Amino acid sequence: MERPEETVQGAQMRQNLEELRALGVEPYPRRFERTHVAEQIHEGFEQLEETEAVIAGRLTAIRGHGKAGFADLRDGSGRIQVYVRKDEIGEEAFAAWKLLDVGDIVGVRGEVFRTRAGEVSVKAAEITLLAKALLPLPEKFHGLKDKEQRYRQRYLDLIANEEVRQVFAGRSVVLSTAREFLEKRGYMEVETPILQPLYGGAFAEPFETHHHALDLTLYLRIADELYLKRLIVGGFERVFEIGKDFRNEGMDRTHCPEFTQLELYEAYADYNDMMELTEELFESIALRLHGATSFEYGEFTIDLKRPWKRLRVMDAVADAVGADALKDPTALFEAARSKGVDIEAGAGFGACVEKILDQLVEPNLMEPTFLIDYPREISPLAKQTPYDPEIVERFEVFVAGLELGNSFSELNDPDEQLRRFEAQVAKRAEGDPEAHGMDEDFVTALMHGMPPTGGLGLGIDRMVMLFTGAPGIRDVILFPPMRPDRKE
RNA sequence: GGGCCGUUAGCUCAGUCGGUAGAGCACCUGCCUUUUAAGCAGGGAGUCGCUGGUUCGAGACCAGCACGGCCCA
């Protein structure tokens, strides 16, 4: 990264700063009172024409014209043109205007009018420098394309690429719509610990840290689940939390070690209720963002109109590798291998199912689909189905091939929960680093009685990808994690 | 972790067979009082990611490293 003094253009901009100071211009003044934003002037032009407006924003283009000039000024609402005439603002002010650069933040007071070419503009009577820029902006036509620089200097990405602003505006809509939707249904927003002495609620390796005062190893949460269910025990019947979870794993198009999850729990409900809630929530967001339940994602047209497809996991697996393969783990393993599933030797039944889903089933789930009823073995927090104790009431939800959420009828039998934890602990002892740990205190909570409960976790980042058409998770996270820049 | 690709002016990108660095935008100078990717004329701007190697000569070829991207695990 060049320092301003090291580039010709940066040096020029700094020189302009010094010359402005010499003219008595303060380049970094304090506050500025504006009367309008760009959008208001465009929308209210009929009423505002020939009246005075005060606007402020960044100069994104300057078109000099001898003793006059035009500039594009961009504020948070949009863009508006500024027209400057030497005979209107005077000799001195015009000299100062000539020293402004693209990128500077300015305030402009002047009359609203329409140019000969028909563009709504503000004719400057007074221009106030509000912040002098000392580095040039990316090129106006092609924008900023270098992915590395876009992520490292997201502010430049936001200035240069309008569609990036739209993605993050969409993210905000997803969050606010979800909050509003849940609050209307009587849900209460809560906050549970991010630093946890035990981590659980998902299969993942955690980030580990140390608290000096307590001399205690703590883990950044991998899920909110076990604390939220304690709140259901405590008598809050509908709770949700939106927050960051952390999983110590690699990054790819759909994974980021630090990601945002919405988790919610509802007493006296089950996973069927959670499916309906999911459908309704997604519909609300789609209507808010796109005005319809259907919209484009990449080359696909997605329609979120409910009801969504429901597909039993074991049916999907039978479909993928043949029904005969379901009779025992060995047969399933062989069948998976023969279909080209990458799977390690010695994988059990549950692990085989997971790999088959992962590689043969899920990537093809383009239309909204609930994959339902998972093997108990790979779902230690979910309640068994009435029809088969080896199968639990659980679903994962997929749209456009994206895994967006996970839900159970929550296991509330403390003895069964203890047995499930013990089975997980055995797996961890066998060397599975992602197996669930024992949480005695959580079992104690269940012993005090947790009502039947439906729970749901939704990956906010992936939902934002879906709703905004963003190709990757890094494109919906403002500052994705990066290695430090060590270029020399 | 593996494979492939990328890194050249502030930005977007060319750079042929290894022969001494290019364009557009941006910037500077001049002209220009309704332009809008303003225009016209002229100009300046580079540690070609880093380190080493091959060569008379490397942006280009080779090796290593750094950072990033895509795909796979």
Image (cartoon, rainbow, N blue to C red):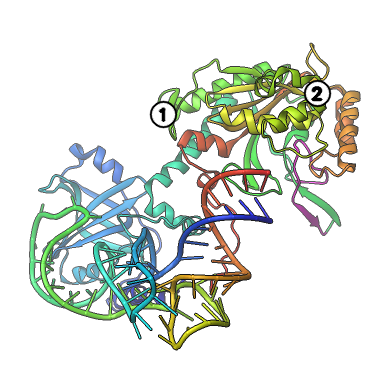
Determine whether A440 is above or below A29 in the image: above
Q: Foreground: B22 or A86? A: B22
Q: Foreground: A297 or A444? A: A297
Residue A209 sits inside the magenta stretch: yes
Examine the image and state in which quarter residue A290 appears: top left
Identify which residue is drawn at 75% across, 18% down: A324
The kind of secondary structure the magenta stretch mainly shows is: loop
The secondary structure type at the circle numbered 1 is helix
Earlier-in-chain disc, 1 versus 2: 1
Identify which residue is drawn at 83% across, 46% down: A197
| Residue A395, image x, y percentages | 68, 23
Question: Taking A384 as reference, is B73 left or right?
Answer: left
Question: Taking A103 as reference, is B38 left or right?
Answer: left
Q: Which residue is mark 1?
A: A290
> Quick check: do tags 1 and 2 share a chain?
yes
Q: Is residue A438 visible?
A: no
The secondary structure type at the circle numbered 2 is loop
Q: Is residue A63 visible?
A: yes
Q: Which residue is mark 2?
A: A411
Q: Chain of mark 1?
A: A
Question: Taking A481 as reference, is A119 left or right?
Answer: left
Question: Taking A454 as reference, is A414 left or right?
Answer: right
Give me the disc on residue A27.
none
Identify which residue is drawn at 75% across, 47% down: A206
Q: What amino acid is found at the position of numbered circle 1 in the picture? A: His
Q: What amino acid is found at the position of numbered circle 2 in the picture? A: Leu
Determine whether A429 is above or below B33 in the image: above
The residue range painted magenta reads A195-212
